[in-house]
């Protein structure tokens, strides 16, 4: 595994499907956001956020996301997508992603996301539950702001 992924505690493996490519014979840009989403959901599962949300109706909501494309991906290949939290605040956290091609052993993209803690029942932003905050700190030791 590439050293770029050494600092990630959540890494998923995704095979590139033929249908992920576009007319230009590389993976379409929108697919990168799907790969990031899959890693984000795996991260939420790891910290217990989705389970918590089912019970408390408080969970993550995506405020913003971005992707910096570095190299094209093509079928056939398999990618590794790392997800982690690098900044933690009272009601939000910033995630960082790396997408690595196993075929070339090179980084294909870097991503970021801003995730807000949201009360779905009352439709408002709320503080991160201590339990979830502690799991994030234990997993990634992010910078608190």
Image (tube, grey):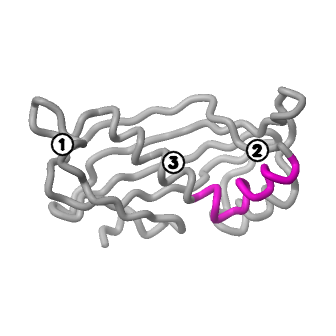
Start and end of the magenta stretch?
Answer: 43-56
Q: Earlier in the sequence, mark 3 or mark 2?
A: 2
- Asked if marks 1 and 3 touch (Cβ < 8 Å), the reply is no
The residue singled out by tag 3 in the image is 96
Q: Is residue 108 above or below residue 24?
A: below
User: Which of these two is toward me, 136 or 143?
Assistant: 136
Q: Earlier in the sequence, mark 1 or mark 3?
A: 1
Q: Is residue 106 above or below residue 127?
A: below
- Asked if marks 3 and 2 touch (Cβ < 8 Å), the reply is no
Q: Is residue 110 left or right of residue 42?
A: left
Where is residue 61, by image quadrant? top right
Q: Residues within 10 Å of mark 2 (few under 14, many from 20)?
A: many
Q: Which mark is residue 59?
A: 2
What residue is rendered at 84% in x and 36% in y?
Answer: 119
Q: Is residue 52 left or right of residue 111?
A: right
Q: State how far apart marks 1 and 2 are (Cα).
A: 33 Å
| Quarter in which the N terminus is drawn | bottom left
Nearer to us of marks 1 and 2 is 2
């Amino acid at each position: 595994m590439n050293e770029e992924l050494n600092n990630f505690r959540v890494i998923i493996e995704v095979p590139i499907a033929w249908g992920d490519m576009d007319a230009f014979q590389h993976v379409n840009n929108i697919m990168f956001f799907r790969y990031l989403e899959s890693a984000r959901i795996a991260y939420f599962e790891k910290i217990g956020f989705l389970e918590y949300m089912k019970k408390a109706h408080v969970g993550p909501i995506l405020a913003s996301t971005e992707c910096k494309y570095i190299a094209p991906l093509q079928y056939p290949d398999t990618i590794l997508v790392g997800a982690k939290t690098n900044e933690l605040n009272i009601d939000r956290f910033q995630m960082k992603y790396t997408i690595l091609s196993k075929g070339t052993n090179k980084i294909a993209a870097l991503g970021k996301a801003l995730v807000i803690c949201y009360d779905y029942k009352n439709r408002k932003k709320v503080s991160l539950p201590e339990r979830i905050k502690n799991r994030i700190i234990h997993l990634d030791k992010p910078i608190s702001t």
